[in-house]
Image (cartoon, rainbow, N blue to C red):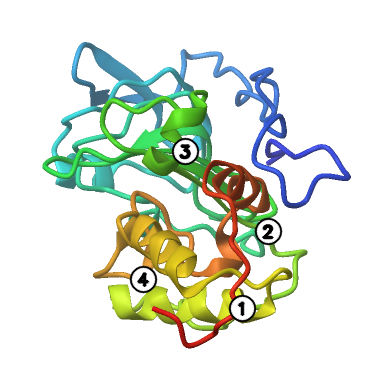
Amino acid sequence: MEQPRKPKGSPNGTGGQYDTTGNGAPAPLPDLNGPATTTAPGRTAPIPWPKDGYGTIRDADLNGMDTTDVLNLDWSNITMQHSDMRNTHVTPLDLPYDPDDYNESGPTFLHTLFGDEPHGYTANYTRFGDDDTFATIAMPGSDPRREKDIDRHLDVCDSHDDPIVYSEEGADRQVFSEDDMRREVDEWRHRHNPKPSARYARRLADTLAGYVDVDHGVWRGTDIPANMDTVSPQWLDAYEYRHPVDDDDDDGAR
């Protein structure tokens, strides 16, 4: 099945890369006896769902749908676009994808919302057919377009063409604590030029720690490993602009 793809030349970016035309994956061939669909109970209206798990679902509102009902749907080869999966207690971790399985690869997503109460974080999540994943994770009431909200949203990306630089920790589904994030940031700090102060590193680690699903070692509402390799370079640049890096002349300063 043809999946939405990123344009070439932008492996690390999180903005302007998505295929928003809705033409990334073709609809299945029509059945002369009528469409082969089942019905998924949406929050506001029933949602037609391909019985064979092959097709494109657009603008689906599954917000608040029962977790078991969501997982019982056939996700074998679904492309979900611009849809709402919040408050289902389902994340992309529960809907895995294998690009090497041509029969039942699993679902891809384009700008689909994940996240549950009570924490209220929302992940606007995209998974492409090559298994590259991108997400903007926003706190309640924040707007990623506002510069002042740089601490209230996080852009993350897992592009498999990029080398692992800082750590291989978090590559597997695992518990991930705030101390783990501080170690990640400290390793990043020692590689950064100019070297940020310990005070700046603590601020950055505290900001990032709020976005971690500590039970699974991923960023909230995603299946993206929580480590410095998957924080968007563009987000780090914007964060640094908002909180200028101060050179650490005294490495022992606290």
Mark 4: few, some, or many residues within 10 Å (few <14, many ≥20)?
many
Name the mark on residue 217.
4
Mark 2: few, some, or many residues within 10 Å (few <14, many ≥20)?
many
Give left or right: position of 10 versus 188: right
Q: CA distance from mark 1 to mark 4?
A: 33 Å
Instruction: List the residue tagged with mark 2.
Output: 159
| Rendered location of residue 164, percent (x, y) | 68, 76
| Rendered location of residue 31, percent (x, y) | 55, 19
Mark 1: few, some, or many residues within 10 Å (few <14, many ≥20)?
few
Q: CA distance from mark 3 to mark 1?
A: 27 Å
**Considering only order in the chain, which callout, 2 or 3, is on the residue closer to the N terminus?**
3
Q: Quadrant of residue 65?
A: top left
Picture quarter with the N terminus: top right
- Foreground: 236 or 5? 236
Kind of residue at badge 3: Ile
Residue depicted at x 43% and y 68%: 199
Residue depicted at x 66% and y 34%: 15
Kind of residue at badge 1: Asp
Name the mark on residue 150.
3
**Considering only order in the chain, which callout, 4 or 1, is on the residue closer to the N terminus?**
4
